[in-house]
């Protein structure tokens, strides 16, 4: 699928999943963490470490969730400051 808006174009996929699978998803992430298969990158970990696969208190009667993945190309950024590569 592709979404186009004002000065905005990106490709994405989505899937609707029953909340019955949240425990399985949490177990999968916990297993990857225990096995050291998750990146140690500080920024990445700041995103993922605080996430929990559970029904939020604000939606106690939720039956499903929507998972969205947005595709982006990997990028490498090099910066120079005072003639030094950062």
Image (cartoon, rainbow, N blue to C red):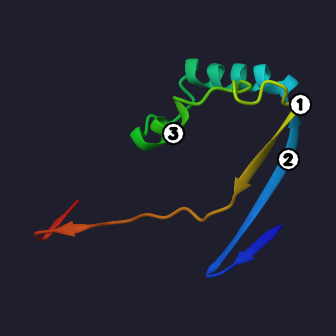
Mark 3 element type: helix
Farthest-out residue, bottom? 7
**Vertical order, 74 against 55 (above or below):** below
- Inter-mark Cα distance, 1 to 2: 14 Å
Which circle marks residue 47 in the picture? 3
Q: Earlier in the sequence, mark 3 or mark 2?
A: 2
> For the residues carrying marks 3 and 1, which lies nearer the camera in this image?
1
Along the viewing direction, whichever of 28 and 22 lies nearer the viewer: 22
Which circle marks residue 23 in the picture? none
> For the residues carrying marks 1 and 2, which lies nearer the camera in this image?
1
The residue wearing badge 1 is 63
Q: Which quadrant is the N terminus positioned in?
A: bottom right
57 left or right, relative to 35: right
Give x and y (percent) for residue 15: 85, 47
Mark 2 element type: strand
- Inter-mark Cα distance, 3 to 1: 25 Å
The residue shown at (87%, 23%) is: 20
Give x and y (percent) for residue 42: 40, 38
Q: Label 2 crowding class (10 Å Cα cut-off): few <14, some 14-19, many 20+?
A: few
21 left or right, relative to 80: right
The residue wearing badge 2 is 15
Give x and y (percent) for residue 69: 72, 53
The residue shown at (48%, 41%) is: 44
Q: Label 1 crowding class (10 Å Cα cut-off): few <14, some 14-19, many 20+?
A: few
């Amino acid at each position: 699928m592709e979404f186009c808006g004002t000065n905005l174009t990106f490709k994405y996929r989505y899937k609707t999943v029953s909340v019955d699978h949240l425990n399985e998803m949490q177990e999968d992430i916990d297993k990857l963490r225990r096995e050291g298969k998750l990146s140690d990158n500080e920024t990445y970990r700041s995103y993922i470490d605080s996430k929990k696969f559970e029904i939020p208190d604000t939606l106690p009667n939720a039956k499903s969730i929507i998972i969205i993945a947005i595709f982006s190309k990997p990028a490498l950024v090099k910066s120079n400051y005072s003639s030094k590569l950062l």
